[in-house]
Image: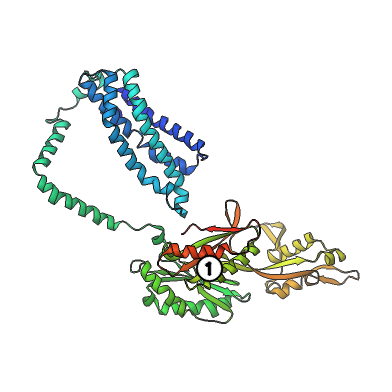
Amino acid sequence: MLLLFLRKLAPTLVIGFAIPFSIIATIGFLYLGGRTLNVLSMMGLMLASGMLVDNAVVVLESIYQHLEKGRGRVEAARIGAKEVVTAVLAATLTSIIIFVPLVFGKKTQFSVYLEDVGLSIIIALLCSLFISLTLIPLAAARMLKMDVGREPRWYEYVKRRLPRPKMSMTDRYLGLMSWTLRRRYLIGFLIVPLIFAGSMYQLMRVPDNAPGAEELDDLNVQYEFSENYHYAKIERDYVNPVERYLLRNRERFKIRDVYSWYGNDEARTRIYFDKDNIDLDELAEIRPRISAGLPVIPGAKITLGSQEGAENREWISVNLLGDDPAKLAELAREARRRLLAQDDFSEVFSDFDRGREEVQVRLNRNLAKKYGISPQSVAGILSVVVRGRKVRGYRTPAGQVDIWVRLQPDDREDLGDLRSIVVGSGPDGEEILLAQVADFDIVKTPGVIRREDRRTYSPLWAIYRGDQKEDGKVIVKDALDTLDYPPGYGWSYGFRM
């Protein structure tokens, strides 16, 4: 495409070389800055590649104009580059300023990912600016032989074969400019406002893809059970009453759909709002009304969980850092207690609210050794009890038949069944039960294990009631700084701030 406009091969190659030179220089600066060439930085280079020739084209065109006026190559290069230095500098800075917030702005979950993209684009554009103001004039003055008085033979050949237009492109452009200048009041007071109004109309039709708008229709209802309930009881006694309450108030709360998921000892209900008729301000008012009307049922604590769309406005997120999930859970409970003691926070959530109860079996090594029971044998027996074990099957004319060894469902329903599992035999042949050689603890564990900078962490979310979020962050900092952290533990702000 450049060859068609410039009609000379040498200037086209010089401008084309600006792309690899800029990219190689960018990679070098990324390396010196301790950055890696990853998918995101390569995407930034890919996006920047289309802008790397802009400055070179402007500088070379300015030099070419002075060559047409009869100046020498060195003088044309010096004057031509000097005339457009302000223009290319301003054009480059206006492109760079778009990506500056990704690199130097407030850190969010999205800006952390896109930082490499913005940084590679900024460096590539700066390298392109440097090349266009140094190497391009140097090439035009010392290396290129540009005959401005004669068109190349291939262009003359194509020009003879094509039909000659009545007006050249230059004449058409000058005619359009002349018509515009003669009717400047019509252009200024009618056509420009029409173009602006049309642009604003199209802009208003663009969907809101900001992080706060993407999850506006998603609100979770959490269930924390006091015992390990069967899924049928959870559905009948807990999930169904919550769904009936929400569906009765569908229009009042502007609910579009309600979805529930449940299993043994776990359940969750998700509320989808009618996002075409609700915004974050209304949601802030609706949420307390939903929470106040949730059914109170013995055996479970039913609360509202996080609502992604509202986090950018009234939620403050922090991460508790450490190694032991049990210690993180203890710190999370203390942090919640301190924050809820402040009137500035209405609700506080942690990953442990979303977690599940698990049974931890701690083998008494002295008793186990007395009966000749090893931890490996107990682990193997529990593996068969919990998951079952696949043994060698047999082949039939219809195909392979798999064989699994596992307990009957009625024999592995509760903690009593686990305690009564036979794990060995005594000196007189009596059965040794698991309860005789092990202790059992029922603990709440997080649903997922999260890591930040190679450290395990547990997130904590707090809903701030005040108007200035920065004031809420100060209160959170004062509360978390005074926690009793073991060596190696601490906290940091979360992504959604």
- Can residue 1 be seen here? no
Q: State the image coordinates of residue 317 (x, y, percent, origin top left).
A: 50, 62
What is the quadrant of residue 361 in the picture? Answer: bottom right
Observer-nearest residue: 81 or 496?
81
> Measured along the vertical axis of the image, is residue 186 above or below residue 82?
below
Tell me the colour scheme of the image. Answer: rainbow
Tell me what residue is drawn at x 77 percent, y 63 percent.
378
- Drawn side of residue 351 relative to residue 211, left or right: right
Tell me what residue is drawn at x 62 percent, y 63 percent.
328
- Drawn side of residue 261 relative to residue 374, left or right: left
Q: State the image coordinates of residue 227 (x, y, percent, origin top left).
A: 63, 76
Per the image, label 1 sits on a secondary structure element best described as strand
> Measured along the vertical axis of the image, is residue 288 above or below residue 449?
below
What is the quadrant of residue 420 in the picture? Answer: bottom right
Q: State the image coordinates of residue 450 (x, y, percent, origin top left).
A: 58, 57
Observer-nearest residue: 466 or 178?
466
Is the N terminus in the top left, top right, bottom left or bottom right quadrant?
top left
> Measured along the vertical axis of the image, is residue 29 above or below residue 451?
above
Q: How many numbered marks have been drawn onto this rendered protein structure? A: 1
Q: State the image coordinates of residue 447 (x, y, percent, origin top left).
A: 58, 64
Tell me what residue is drawn at x 38 percent, y 57 percent.
210
- Drawn side of residue 490 relative to residue 156, left or right: right
Extreme residue in the right direction: 428
Name the amino acid type tagged 1.
Answer: Phe
- Can residue 290 be seen here? yes
Residue designated by label 1: 349
Tell me what residue is drawn at x 34 percent, y 40 percent.
93
Q: Residues within 10 Å of mark 1 (few under 14, many from 20)?
A: some
